[in-house]
Structure formats: structure tokens, C-alpha cells
Image (cartoon, helix red, strand yellow):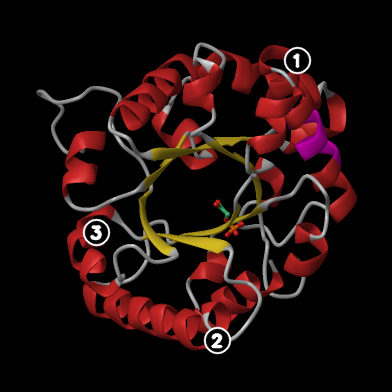
């Protein structure tokens, strides 16, 4: 059974005091409204603050509950002379459970390649954590190119070296670059089309049973207004939420839409 997941990616936002305030609001709202008083208790919520706040954030999130702590990135090596970076094992040691890998901003601004992301996925899985592997095409590709083939290539290059057992622990996030932070959400039909293609592509390598169990999240200007439509699509298992995760009420409304 694939999981329903709503993950909040705070990116490079919030001071420590702001982060503490947002986190305690979100945790309390989820406890009071989303998990305990609704039928949405099966949603896993992942909160991904900036790495400097992870240790503090851990103290705000009850262990063993439905809210998980996530990181926004990790290095592809286990340890070593990589000034300024953090490894998957370091993130694990402060209580991180999920790690976003290959966000388009990492690909764009830090030149992360599919091969490098394959290594990151390996480090995350070796540490027993869950990678949220991001894929998605640019506007130019969407309008003029084989965007489905491009996204399939990202999956092939960074995930298809995994065994079926390992792949079962991966969460995929489809995030069309043209929809991230732009207010241009993919329509529900566009999201469904790509999520279906992604699942088919996984099925072509690993078989239908494996593909049906993988959670595929949508990301890109998802918010409290459009989340219900997006999440109603049969192959959309939740969302990776940027801007709308920075406000407690909006984020919990997105969770309720799932
Ligand atoms: P957005 O970001 O919701 O602000 O578009 C999503 C993401 O980049 O994960």
C-alpha cells in the first residue's frame, strides 16, 4: 500500500525563532485538527526545515508519530573533506527520517547531475532513511520537447540501479520546474499524466506490483486552493509543498486536502 505523504520544503527561509514558531503551530494544528479529529490519520507529514534547524526541530516533533523530520539535501559521500556540507549519516544522527534528493534548485544552482544524485540516493538508503527523489522538466522542454522522455531519463539514471527492495523505500516527487514558485501549477490532468507515466516507467523495469506501491508526490505551486484537485488524481499520492508550507494554516489546509 502506497503512503499518502505531504512534505513541506521550507527552502532557505525563516530565522530560528520563526522556525520554532512555525513548527510548533504546525505540530499543534496537526495534532488537534488533522490527525486526531479527522479521517486523514493515514497521511504522513514530512517537515523539511533548513539543516541548521534540524536538531532543534527534532525536539518539536513527537517521535513515532505521523510527522517526520526531513532534510533538504545531503552530500553524496559518507564523510570527508567537503567543507560546508552534511552527510546522510550526520542527518540521521540528529533524527532526520527523510531527505529530499535532486530538487531542481540543487540541479540548477549547484549543478547536481543524475549520476551524483544516484550516489546521494544510495547514501540515504544505506542509512535507512527515505529519499524524496525529485524529477521534472523545464518550460522549454514542456513546450518544445520530449518532456516525458526527459523525466523518465532522470529516473533511469538516478534510480534504476537500485534493487526492487531498495526502490520500494524511495518516494518520487514530480516537480515541473515551470511550476515551482511561479504560481503556475500544473493542471490536475497534467500532473496525472506525468505521474501515470512515471509509474509506468517504474513498472517497465520493476513490474507493476512495485510501481503500484511507490508514492509519487506532486510539487510546484501547490496550495490550499488547488491541493484537493491535484490529490484527487489516481496517481498523485501527495505533495511536496514549498511556499505554502511556510504558513501554518495554509500548510495544514493542504494536508487536510489529502
Ligand atoms: P513551491 O515549491 O510550492 O513554492 O512551488 C515546491 C518545491 O520546490 O518543492
The quarter holding residue 150 reads top right
Find disc 2 in the rendering and name its residue: 33
- Could you say which disc has been placed on residue 74 in the image? none
The quarter holding residue 106 reads top left
Q: Distance between the residues labelled 1 and 2?
A: 40 Å
The quadrant in which the N terminus is found is: top right
* In the image, farthest residue toward the left: 81
- First to last magenta residue range: 193-198
The quarter holding residue 152 reads top right
Residue, x 68% and y 66% (percent of image)?
258
Residue, x 83% and y 45% (percent of image)?
192
Residue 178 visible from this viewpoint: yes
Residue 239 point in image, percent of width and height: 63, 56
Residue 137 point in image, percent of width and height: 69, 33
Specify whether 150 is left or right of 120.
Answer: right
Residue 9 point in image, percent of width and height: 46, 57
Q: Distance between the residues labelled 2 and 3?
A: 24 Å
52 drawn magenta? no
Which numbered disc, 2 or 3, marks the residue that appears first in the sequence?
A: 2
Specify whether 93 is left or right of 216.
Answer: left
- Ligand 1 near label 1 (Cβ, under 8 Å)? no
233, above or below 170, in the image? below
Q: Distance between the residues labelled 1 and 3?
A: 37 Å
Q: How crowded is mark 2: few (under 14 residues within 10 Å), some or many (20 or more)?
A: some
Find disc 3 in the rendering and name its residue: 54
Q: In which of the image's four quarters is ligand 1 placed?
A: bottom right
Residue 87 visible from this viewpoint: no
Find disc 1 in the rendering and name its residue: 204
Specify whether 69 is left or right of 230.
Answer: left
211, above or below 171, in the image? above
Amino acid at each position: 500500500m502506497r503512503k499518502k505523504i505531504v512534505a513541506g520544503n521550507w527552502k532557505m527561509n525563516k530565522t530560528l525563532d520563526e522556525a520554532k514558531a512555525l513548527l510548533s503551530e504546525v505540530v499543534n494544528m496537526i495534532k488537534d485538527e488533522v490527525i486526531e479529529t479527522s479521517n486523514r490519520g493515514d497521511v504522513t507529514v514530512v517537515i523539511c526545515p533548513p539543516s541548521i534547524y534540524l536538531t532543534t526541530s527534532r525536539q518539536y516533533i513527537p517521535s513515532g508519530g505521523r510527522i517526520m523530520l526531513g532534510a533538504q539535501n545531503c552530500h553524496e559521500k559518507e564523510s570527508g573533506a567537503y567543507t560546508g556540507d552534511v552527510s546522510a549519516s550526520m542527518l540521521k544522527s540528529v533524527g532526520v527520517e527523510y531527505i529530499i534528493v535532486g530538487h531542481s534548485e540543487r540541479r540548477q544552482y549547484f549543478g547536481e547531475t543524475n549520476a551524483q544524485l544516484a550516489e546521494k540516493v544510495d547514501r540515504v538508503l544505506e542509512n535507512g532513511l527515505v529519499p524524496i527523489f525529485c524529477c521534472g522538466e523545464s518550460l522549454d522542454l514542456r513546450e518544445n520537447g520530449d518532456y516525458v522522455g526527459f523525466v523518465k531519463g532522470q529516473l533511469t539514471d538516478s534510480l534504476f540501479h537500485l534493487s526492487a527492495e531498495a526502490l520500494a523505500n524511495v518516494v518520487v516527487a514530480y516537480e515541473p520546474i515551470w511550476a515551482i514558485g511561479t504560481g503556475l501549477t500544473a493542471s490536475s490532468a497534467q500532473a496525472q499524466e506525468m505521474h501515470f507515466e512515471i509509474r509506468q516507467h517504474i513498472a517497465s523495469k520493476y513490474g507493476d506490483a512495485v510501481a503500484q506501491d511507490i508514492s509519487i508526490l506532486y510539487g510546484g505551486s501547490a496550495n490550499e486552493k488547488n491541493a484537493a484537485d491535484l490529490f484527487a488524481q489516481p496517481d498523485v499520492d501527495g505533495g511536496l509543498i514549498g511556499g505554502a508550507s511556510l504558513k501554518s494554516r495554509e500548510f495544514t489546509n493542504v494536508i487536510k486536502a489529502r
